[in-house]
Image: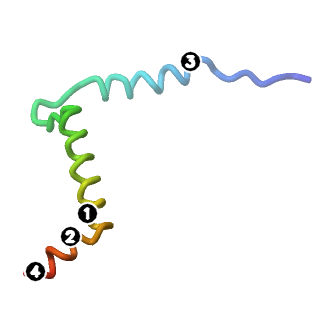
Amino acid sequence: MASKKKSEGSGIQQAAGLIRYFDEESEHAWKITPMQVYGACIIIGVFFYLVNQGVVSAIWNLF
């Protein structure tokens, strides 16, 4: 039984364009540090914890 061969060059050729595209960084792009990501995760986690404990609704009812 004959086996079909894939063209070996097509995958590398297609990936080369993506590597060149993602290799460039824009000067105007936002730069997010890992500490900013950790901080955002902690803040969101604390907020949802307080919502589940009813603290946020209690504060909301004061106003």
How far apart are the two marked residues, 1 and 4, measured between alpha carbons?
16 Å
The disc, 1 or 4, on the residue closer to the chain's N-terminal end is 1
Q: Are marks 2 and 1 in contact (CB under 8 Å)?
A: yes
Residue 7, position in %: x, y? 64, 21
Q: Residue at x 22, y 69 (%)?
A: 55
The disc, 3 or 1, on the residue closer to the chain's N-terminal end is 3
Quarter of the rendering containing residue 62:
bottom left
Q: Is residue 31 left or right of residue 7?
A: left
Q: Which quadrant holds the C terminus?
A: bottom left
How far apart are the two marked residues, 3 and 2, measured between alpha carbons?
58 Å
How far apart are the two marked residues, 2 and 4, measured between alpha carbons?
10 Å
Q: Are marks 3 and 1 in contact (CB under 8 Å)?
A: no
Q: Is residue 38 left or right of residue 15?
A: left
The amino acid marked with disc number 2 is: Val
Callout 1: few (<14), some (14-19), or many (20+) C-alpha neighbours within 10 Å?
A: few
Element type where label 3 sits in the image: helix
Callout 4: few (<14), some (14-19), or many (20+) C-alpha neighbours within 10 Å?
A: few
Q: Residue at x 19, y 76 (%)?
A: 58
Between marks 3 and 2 in the image, the one whose residue lies nearer the viewer: 2
The amino acid marked with disc number 3 is: Gly
Element type where label 2 sits in the image: helix
Callout 3: few (<14), some (14-19), or many (20+) C-alpha neighbours within 10 Å?
A: few
Residue 49, position in %: x, y? 30, 59
The amino acid marked with disc number 1 is: Leu
Residue where numbered disc 4 is placed = 62
How far apart are the two marked residues, 3 and 1, measured between alpha carbons?
55 Å
Element type where label 1 sits in the image: helix
Residue where numbered disc 3 is placed = 9
Quarter of the rendering containing residue 23:
top left
Which disc number belongs to residue 50? 1
Q: Is residue 46 left or right of residue 62?
A: right
Q: Is residue 30 left or right of residue 11?
A: left
